[in-house]
Amino acid sequence: MASVLVTGGAGYLGSHTCVELLSAGHDVVVFDNLSNSCEEALNRVQELTHKSLTFVQGDIRYQDEIDQVFSDHHIDVVIHFAGLKAINESLETPLTYFDHNVVGGTQLLKSMEKAKVFTLIFSSSATIYEAIGDIPLHEDVPVLSKNNYSYTKLITEQMLQQIAKADSRWSIALLRYFNPVGAHKSGRIGEDPQGVPNNLMPYITQVAVGRRKKLSIYGHDYDTIDGTGVRDYIHVVDLANAHLCALNNRLGAKGCRAWNIGTGRGSSVLQVKNSFEEVTGIPIAFELSSRRAGDVATSCADNSRAVTELGWQPQYTLEDMLADSWNWQKQNPNGYN
Ligand code: NAD
Ligand code: UFG
C-alpha cells in the first residue's frame, strides 16, 4: 500500500479519487487551498469509507507550504488535481491560470525532487487535442492549445515529459480526461460548481432541481448525429479508478506516458438531455441557441491504450452517470452548502 499526496483532493475529481484510494487501503494526505471546494467533502469521504485521511490546507504556489507537507508526512506518490479549470475564466485572467496551473505545478515538482518523491499522476485534459478529423482521439494525434486553460495543461505535460527524459528517476502518468460526470452512488459527494455551471451535466441537474429555468443547447448545426455537440462522458468513479490503475503501473515503471480516460462512446447534447428525462422522469426545459466559442463538434476517446496498458475498464453507462448525477443533486440541491 502507498502513501498518496492528493493535491486538490477536496474538489470534484479529487474527493472521488480519495474514496477509491482509502477503500483500496492506501494512506491519503490531501493538500488543498479550498478555493473551489470545502472541507465538508472530505468529511463525507471519511464517512463513506470509515477511514481517516490527513488534510492540510495550503496552496501549491507556495513552496514552503508544500515542503512542509513532505517533511511532515511520508509520501510515495503524488496525484496532482489542484488547479483552475474554467475555460472562459482562463481567457479573462490568463496570468492567474498560468500562476496556479503552471507555476503551482513547478513548485510542486521542486518540492517532490527535494523530498525524493518521483512518482506523479497528473490531471490532464482532452481539451489539449486538436480534435479536428481523427475521431476517436488516440494519444498520438496532434495536440494544440485552444485557450489559456488547455495551454496550461499542454505546457505542464511538455514540462513533465522533458523532466522524465532528463532524469530517469521520474515516473509520470499524464491522464487525459474526457468529460467526467456523475457522482458517488451514495449521493454524499458530487460536483458542486460555484455560480452558474459552465458544463452540461450540472446545468441539466440544476434545471431539474429548479435552480435554473432552462438549458441552452449551444449549437444545433454541427456535423453530428442530431446537430448538437458530441462528447465522451465518463463516470467520475471510473475516472477515480483509473488513478489507482495508473498508480500501480507507475510504481514499477520509469518515464512519462499519456493515457486517455474516456469510454470511447460519444453522446450528443440532445441524447444526454433525452436520456436524463427518461432516467429521472423529469422534463428539462431547453432552447436551441448558437454555438459556444471554442467548442468542437465531437470529442471522443480511443481508450485502448489505458485498457491494455493500465488494465483499466470503465464500468458505468451513460444512464448510470445521469442517475448518479441526479441522486447527488436531489440530495444536495445547494451542493455542500
Ligand atoms: P475542482 O475545482 O473541483 O478541484 C480542484 C481543487 O484544487 C479544488 O478543491 C481547489 O480548491 C483546489 N485548488 C485550486 N487551486 C489550488 C492551489 N493553487 N493550491 C491548492 N489547491 C488548489 O476541479 P476538478 O473537476 O476536480 O478537476 C481536477 C483537475 O482535473 C483539475 O486540474 C482540472 O483541470 C482537471 N480536469 C478536470 C476536468 C473536468 O471536467 N472536471 C476535465 C479535464 C481535466
Ligand atoms: N453545452 C450546452 N449547454 C450548456 C453547457 C454545455 O449545450 O449549458 C454543450 C457544449 O456546447 C458541448 C457539450 O455540452 O457540446 C459539453 O460541454 P461541457 O461544457 O460540459 O464540456 P466541454 O467538452 O466543453 O469541456 C469539458 C471541461 C473541460 C475539459 C474538457 C475535456 O469543461 O475542462 O471537457 O476534458 F477540458
Image: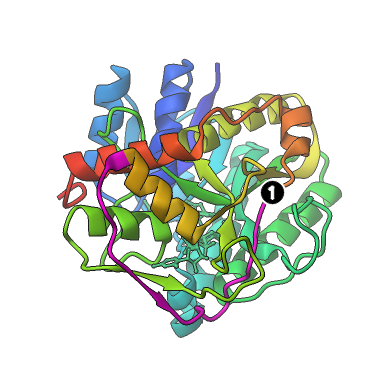
Pointer 1 local density, CA inside 10 Å: few below 14, some 14–19, many at least 20: many
**Quadrant of the rendered image containing residue 137:** bottom right
Secondary structure state at the residue bearing disc 1:
loop
Residue 335 position, x and y percent, is 21, 49
Colour scheme: rainbow
Asked if residue 249 can be seen in this view, the reply is yes
- Is residue 54 covered in magenta? no
Where residue 321 appears, as percent x and y from the top left, is 43, 39
Q: Which residues are magenta?
A: 280-300
Rendered position, 159 above or below 74: below
Identity of the residue drawn at 19% across and 46% down? 336
Answer with left or right where residue 68 lies relative to residue 282: right
Rendered-image quadrant of the N terminus: top right
Residue 86: where, in percent of width, then height? Answer: 44, 68
- Left or right of 2 on screen, residue 308: right
Q: Which residue is mark 1?
A: 301
Viewer-proximal residue among 5 and 287 = 287
Give 47 or 297, whichever is nearer the viewer.
Answer: 297
Q: Is residue 14 above or below residue 285?
A: above
Q: Residue at x 85, y 49 (%)?
A: 165
Q: Amino acid at mark 1?
A: Ala
Residue at 27% of width from left, 37% of height from top? Answer: 327
Q: Magenta: predominant secondary structure element?
A: loop
